Structure formats: C-alpha cells, structure tokens
Amino acid sequence: MANASTDNPTAAVLVIGDEILSGRTADTNLNTVARFLTELGVDLLEARVVGDRREQIVDAINTLRSGHDYLFTTGGIGPTHDDITAECVAAAFGVALPFHPEALAILERRYGADFNDARRRMARIPEGGTLIRNPVTDAPGFQVENVFVMAGVPKIMQVMLEDVRPRLRTGAAVVSRTLKVEGVGEGVLSAPLEAVATAYPELSLGSYPFGSGSNDFGAQLVVRGRDADRVRAAIKDLTAALKDAGVERITPLD
Amino acid sequence: MANASTDNPTAAVLVIGDEILSGRTADTNLNTVARFLTELGVDLLEARVVGDRREQIVDAINTLRSGHDYLFTTGGIGPTHDDITAECVAAAFGVALPFHPEALAILERRYGADFNDARRRMARIPEGGTLIRNPVTDAPGFQVENVFVMAGVPKIMQVMLEDVRPRLRTGAAVVSRTLKVEGVGEGVLSAPLEAVATAYPELSLGSYPFGSGSNDFGAQLVVRGRDADRVRAAIKDLTAALKDAGVERITPLD
C-alpha cells in the first residue's frame, strides 16, 4: 500500500506481556486499537510487543512516546508480581509512583474488606497521571502526557478506549472502498493496480489475496484516502483497467 | 512473569503490512510463530509491526537481526507494488536483488504462459539468500543469514515454517503446567504467586485472569521452566500456598 503523508496525528501501540511472546495468548488488542484509531483519523504507524522485562518496556515507551503523537499500551496493570507497567511508565517519565487518592477510593469501594496489598498496587499511578475509567472491573488505567496505559484483558481494554476517545485530537477520517475480484491471481492484478496507484499518489492502494486453490481464489483490492471523490474516481479507473487486463469477475463491496 | 535467562537462542518477529496497522486485517502470524518457537526452545523476545514504508522496514530489520539470533518476517513478498520486503531486506544487508534461477524456474513451472513481470518480481532474492519452500502457492520465501522472510498469508506462512524448522538451533524446550482457580480474583492470588516466584527464581510464573462478573471468574496460573521436576515442585508449593490463602477451587489443567 502506498503511503500518503498527512497532518493526521500519529500513534504507536505497545503490547506488554510474556504470554503474547510465548504464544500462550493471541493478542487481539492491536487490531481493536488499530480500527479505533483509523475511524478517528489517527495514523497508527507502528506497534511493538515486549515481554515483562523492565528495561525493554521502559526503552520501548520512551522510543514510541517521543516518536509519535500518542502511545497506547496494553497489559501489565493488574495486581500480580508480573504486572510492572505502571512502574515502567513512571521510570520512563522519571517521576514517582505514588498512590492516587481517587484510584484508592475506587478500589476501596469495590473490594471493601478484601482490599489487600496486591490490589492496592493497582492504585499506584505515575505522578501527574490522570485516570482512565474501567466500568468492567473498576481498576483504572491511566494517562501520562501522550501515553495511554490500558489493561490487557480485551473486554476491559475496549471500554477504556471509550474513555480515551474524547481526549484525542482526531484527523481526517479515511474513506475506503473495496473491489472483490475472483478467479484471478495477484500477478494479473499488479499492473492495473500500479497504474492507478501512480495516477493517484495521494491514495493508498492495497491488494489482499484470498484462497489459493484452483476454484475459490482472488483478491480484495482496497483504495483508501481522505477525499471521497478521489477514492471514487480511482475505483472507477481501477475497474476499467482491470477489465482491460481481462479480469471479468469484479464486484464492488461497498 | 519473571524471566529466566538461558542459553536458548533468541528471536524477534517483524510483521510487515499497512493492513495490520489500519486494522483491516488482524494478524495471526505472530501467535503462530510464537508457539512454533516456544516448542523449539527458541526465546521470542520481541515483535514489531510496521507499515509498507521502506525506511521503517529497513531500520526494523537491521535493529532486530543484530539484536537477536533469528529474525522472522511476515508479509510483503507478493507480486504487487506494495510488496517491498525483498528490496528492503537487500537494502538492510547492502546486497543486490537479482533474479534467483531456482525461484524463476519454480514460478515459470507454475505460471507457464502467464508468467508476467509482476510474478517475476517474486523471483528476486537478495544476493546470498536461500529459498524457503512454499508448497501452497509455490512462490518462495527466503533466508538471508539469520533472517527468515515469509509470506503474510497465514496458511502459506505456516508451511514455510516447516521448511525453516530444521535450519534452527534449538534450545531447552519449556515445560509448562497450569492451575485453574475459580471464584477468586487476582488480588487474592498475588501473595501466594509472588512467594513461589521468589522461591523458584529460575521459573516463570504468570497469572491470566478470565471472566469479570460475579459468577464465572478466576485465573489460570501458569508455571513455566526448563526443568520439569522444578516446575512440578513449584506447582505443588503453589497449590499449598493457595489453599493457605483460602482458595478452594483449584484444578490442575495438565
């Protein structure tokens, strides 16, 4: 896919957890955050996955927060000994990690007499941080400057995004249109695609093959951009170019 | 999860493709490679996802290949204009990108009269590279030194791993045992977990909560390590510590 430079805010995602790198858990948060950001016109430019290792987490936070307008982290903010994201964020910003009065109050209300030391850990928020609400299990995420620190459990991460949404500067949302072509391989599609990509340098064109056998195979051709008229014109030109190349089964999907 | 240093080979994964960062496609290859490497005793220490941008890809390849014993890339080796992984690998190693005779022969055999310029692109292999077989659609991946370059289509990536397997130095495989605990939150589990983690510094202990309501919730507690006897002993101690903490529903899963 070509890459159009824009004035949109940029972002990175940092997924934290040994369980992702061991393969025990398949991450789904990256895709959730990616779709969320695309919808808001925030350009997600990179993602990293690191284990529960302090130095690696701190380095990644500092690299990604300085290279992008926003950094979103997932994982490592629970009550157990392997949950070290909060202390890593504090270290990355060079600030203390005190108990946050509002976080303490939220957790105290939830746990009552069962509010033990482990749970108290979840109320430690880097100095200057503001809370991200968690209506599912109450234990909050937090924001420090341009870094949003969220839970790893997908259902919790998803609701946290809703609390983050109004805090973000948004960009021009992307318009996307897709042609499904069947019975033809990418090798035939390449020349028409490249011709249209060259004629519309501000748009992104992608080709996503499906199938591999002799029957049900083809590709989805996706044109993306901020200007709906240009996307529509490119789809029209691409359809014509595909027909010229002998492609017969072309279906607009949207 | 604590982290035991070992003599195992280390690895990184680089997922390449705008479609992952836009959220259009949910990556599954990272999990597949992670499980594959864990089984072989190769420690996957980090993963990155980048878009179809040359400079970003080249930088990531050079950082990750020099920091780890192995680098596995997925995506960007098809025939279309946005498939730029091969040229990026060549640039990263500072070598040319000639047509590879065997790759040409393989693709010529598959496509016959339909072997056009776009498909010919897939036979360009960085100098010094060896092919990775693709029994699904024939177009090969390739290996340059410690970098394994594979397709993005999961079914193809998976069979390529089988051709890569005998080329890897393997380490001590990890033994893993899991306790399922129900009706109790991580806040109660934290102290017993930390006690056992401290007593067995060479093992990794992780806690993975499930559920969030008042009925069906709990956590899977995983003990991992290279020495099966130590893992077994830690599981026994952890079970005892959990019972002491008042946890009643404990089920060994393996």
Image (spheres, coloured by chain):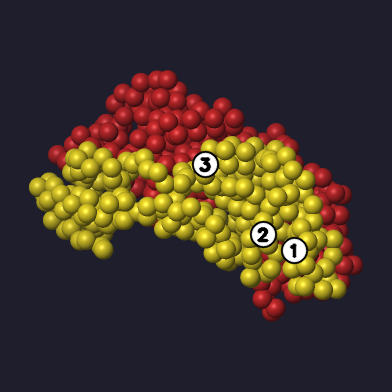
Chain colours: A yellow, B red
Which secondary structure, mark 3?
Answer: loop
Residue drawn at x 12%, y 51% is: A240
Residue on which the image places disc 1: A102
Does the image show residue B44? no
Of A209 and A35, nearer the camera is A35
User: What number is the disc on residue A68?
Assistant: 3
- The chain under label 1 reads A
Kindly check if marks 1 and 2 are in contact, taking CB atoms under 8 A apart as contact: yes
Residue B251 drawn above or below residue A73:
below
Mark 3 burial class by Cα count in 10 Å: few <14, some 14-19, many 20+? some
Q: Quadrant of residue B241?
A: bottom right
Earlier sequence position, callout 2 versus callout 3: 3
Q: In the image, what residue occupies the spot 51% across and 54% down?
A: A168
- Above/below status of A53 relative to B104: below
The answer to whether the residue labelled 1 contacts the one labelled 3, judged by CB atoms less than 8 Å apart, is no
The type of residue carrying mark 1 is Glu
In the image, residue B73 lies at what x, y percent?
46, 39
Q: Nearer the viewer, residue A154 or B201?
A: A154
Residue A95 in sight: yes
Q: Are marks 2 and 3 on the same chain?
A: yes
Q: Which mark is residue B108?
A: none
- Which residue is disc 2 drawn over? A131
The residue nearer to you, when weighing B21 against B86, is: B21
- The correct choice, above or below, for A136 with respect to B138 in the image is below
The image quadrant that residue A57 belongs to is top right
Residues at marks 1 and 2, CA–CA distance in whole angstroms: 8 Å
Q: Pick whichever of labels 1 and 2 is earlier in the sequence.
A: 1
